[in-house]
Image: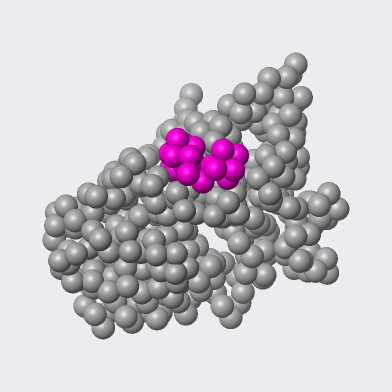
Amino acid sequence: MITPFNFTLPTKIIYGVGMLKVLPEELKKMKAKKIMVVTDSKLVALKLTDKLEEWLEGFDYIIFDEIEQNPKDYNITKAADKAVEFGADTLIAFGGGSPIDAAKVVAILAAQGGTVREYMHKERAIEKAIQLITIPTTAGTGSEVTFSSVITDSKEKFKYTVKSPLIASKVAIIDPMMTLTVPPSITAATGMDALTHAIEGYTALCTEPLAEAMGLWAVKYIAESIEKAVMDGSDIEARDKMMMGSLMAGLSFSHSDVAAVHCMAEALGSLYDAPHGVCNAVLLPYVMEYNVTASEKKYAEIAHYMGLYGPNDLMTASEGIENIKIISRRIGLQGLKSLNIKTEDFEILSEMSEKNGSNFSNPKEINRQDYLKIFKRAYADS
Ligand SMILES: [Fe+2]
């Protein structure tokens, strides 16, 4: 019997090459009068925001471009103050996961006030948020269709998840053309983040059949196209498949959960401000090695979706894990050592991983001692 579940998707998804063109029409339908774009300075420097601005002609808008990697509480406060001062009724989150996650919390603060801390620590209920359009410029985060936002508490150096269907975007415009100029290193890192979402969304303890289906198809799309997209950024077919893989992976984990890889990656991101995708990539196969005895059937299925078949589930699963290590190396991602981590921090990182809200979603029970062993193993192997 399938365990009862519900599947809510408040976001209208508009997908396709060249579909950014629907932005003016969607803004009119949403009756947007005062628009604030939430993005980061790199996208402005790369002139990617110019493409967006072409479609904003005639609208009253401002651009806030001060969102940092691993968005911090103070980024949100500053952006929300700007939104209130401008009288924004609509936000456009434009970028990778950081601007999109940030915009979701800016939308709450701009609508109902309060401090970021109150929402991060669940001291105040989320009752409303101003309307949001998400336009991803990387294939990785999936944040354009999730109801959650991961924000770093800058004092505690710990990442908290703010979750509510009210912060889901009203419209997600997902145009693979936006990723054509993403450099290979970012394509690789964000792509591995998406692969991690797919695998964790499919295998998390709280998963359900729709999340499982989308997780598996995401694995297929990503495994088929990640190397091509990294080697030739202008390969629109590969970019298209990566974008679809990332979208499906986002839908999967947001209706299931992430698990131990993200628990560890978020600890690394909080303590070292390291890129989220790289943190996931350097840990994913090692967490899978730990989980394999509890997930061999599902891991074998993942390997099948990568086109791999072995004599039994365990051997097929192991082949899949090895394949992830190979893909990672081929797309230029180095191991855990490349993040310049101090080994004496492994204890605190393991403690932080255990405290993560997704720890209990891991398919195999895991505690700080287990995390410590995985950190050491990943480090020794890199
Ligand atoms: Fe992620």
Q: Is residue 124 magenta?
A: no
Query: In the visual, does 42 lie left or right of 38?
Result: right
Query: In the visual, does 370 lie left or right of 358?
Result: right
Residue range (magenta): 226-248
Q: Of 88 and 108, which appears nearest the observer?
A: 88
Q: Position of residue 15 (x, y in %)?
A: 32, 41
Q: Does residue 275 appear anywhere in the picture?
A: yes
Q: Residue at x 24, y 50 (%)?
A: 21
Question: Compared with residue 124, is residue 161 higher up or lower down, i.e. above or below?
Answer: above
Q: Residue at x 27, y 54 (%)?
A: 170
Q: How is the image coloured?
A: one colour
Q: Does residue 215 appear anywhere in the picture?
A: no
Q: Position of residue 200 (x, y in %)?
A: 58, 43
Q: Of 270 and 358, which appears nearest the observer?
A: 270
Q: Is residue 243 magenta?
A: yes
Q: Residue at x 76, y 66 (%)?
A: 340
Q: Residue furthest right?
A: 380
Q: Position of residue 188 (x, y in %)?
A: 59, 49
Magenta stretch: dominant SS?
helix
Q: Quadrant of residue 101?
A: bottom left
Query: In the visual, does 65 lie left or right of 290?
Result: left
Query: In the visual, does 24 lie left or right of 300?
Result: left
Question: Compared with residue 347, is residue 230 higher up or lower down, i.e. above or below?
Answer: above
Q: Residue at x 30, y 60 (%)?
A: 52
